Amino acid sequence: MDALIPIVEKLRCGGRIDAAEALALWQDAPLWLLSELAVAAKQRVSGDKVYYNRNFHLEPTNVCTFECKFCSYRRRAGQDGAWDYSLEQVLDIVRQRKDSGATEIHIVGGVHPTHDLYYYADMIAHIKQIMPQAAIKAFTAVELNIMIDRAGLTTAEGLALLQRAGMESIPGGGAEIFDADIRRQICPQKGSAEQWLSLHRTAHGMGIDSNATMLYGHIDGLSHRVDHLMRLRELQDSTGGINAFIPLKYRSANNELSYLGETTITDDLRTLAMSRLVLDNVPHIKAYWVMYGKQTTELALAFGADDIDGTIDDSTKIYSMAGAADTAPTMSIEDIHRICSNAGFRAVERDTHYNEI
Ligand code: V47
Ligand code: SF4
């Protein structure tokens, strides 16, 4: 514990810790200390506020040509449990939610064998016609890299096409864990860390902001998590385009890594706090309530999170298929306010870019 004193002092003065210091803190600091440091860091950025938005997810298809070992969601075309909505079916979902008050539509799916960049640009343009007031936050860097590559365009050209159609922001998925060896074992077909980082870097340069994630609690170790956070901090130092970081807890139902089971809630809380402490340049740390469940989300607010995501309105299947408690995830505005105030904070509605509403 004595060895941690200079690190703790540095953090209390708002200083930046390096990888070795982060690892030492992660391994040895008591839970109460991580909570205290992370809440102090959160309060410097967002005071007593905890952000949420009104949103829904669109998952046009779970048909995917990749075989990530942690994924419970993907199916082959025609396989039991596969869905592959037509454009009209996707637009019907949007029409049904047109007057829901949602300010954001989060779109992700599988790496589809045939749907291409032009198909998705057209989809976004049609969605914008139905809900011009909603921001489109669409496609993981992995999906984007594949569709842009297949179209034979540069990243900037492909992103510009989607931006013109109405895409404003990029969600944080596909980052998994940046370490090449772990990545090879859990998601061999996904591009490299450099490809993920490079797409986000290009997007930021074009005024498209983004989120970042880290999938943890499978075969990763703490040093892999520190390395992941350091690479994101470096990107953020140079672009400033990351709005929020979301640590994603590996959920173990119905996938090839099920035998690993799941990590503990204390590991989740330590990971949130360390994310806040290492990512001193990322303004928001999101406790994604769909993944943790509502009770743990309340606890997460005592570990540096200042965002809990949105109302969702039972529109995502990624986590319920992987064993999350809510099989039909939906959160009322009253629930959001209750969770935040129970944790000692004030719920504030935001838009996709964290402007307060
Ligand atoms: O990249 C897939 C993860 C991600 C499992 O940007 C799993 O606001 C845990 O990125 N256990 C997609 N995680 C979801 C995502 C996301 C979610 C919420 C908010 C935002 C945002 C982004 O889901 C994938 C992968 O890392 N994932 N399977 C699983 N079994
Ligand atoms: Fe496909 Fe995404 Fe699942 Fe990987 S995580 S198998 S890319 S749907």
Image (cartoon, rainbow, N blue to C red):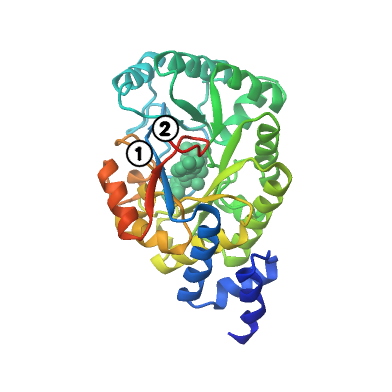
Q: Quadrant of the C terminus?
A: top left
Q: Which image quarter: residue 79?
A: top left
From this view, report whether residue 280 is shown above or below residue 129.
below
Outermost bottom residue: 2
Rendered location of residue 27, percent (x, y): 56, 75
The picture places residue 152, in percent across and down from the top left corner, at 70, 20
Q: How far apart in space, not on screen, are marks 2 and 1 (Cα)? A: 9 Å
Q: Earlier in the sequence, mark 2 or mark 1?
A: 2
Q: Residues within 10 Å of mark 2 (few under 14, many from 20)?
A: many
Q: Is residue 289 above or below residue 103?
A: below
Front-most of 123 and 34? 34
Q: Secondary structure at mark 2?
A: loop
The residue identified by callout 2 is: 62
From this view, report whether residue 149 is shown above or below residue 126.
Answer: below
Please, what secondary structure does the residue beneath circle 1 have?
A: loop
**Residue matched to label 1:** 317
Q: Is mark 2 within 8 Å of ligand 2?
A: yes
Residue 67 in view: no
Q: Split into 4 quadrants, where in the image is the N terminus?
A: bottom right
Residue 191's place in the image compared with 98, above or below, is below
Say few, some or many: other residues with alpha carbon within 10 Å of mark 1 (under 14 / 14 to 19 / 20 or more): many
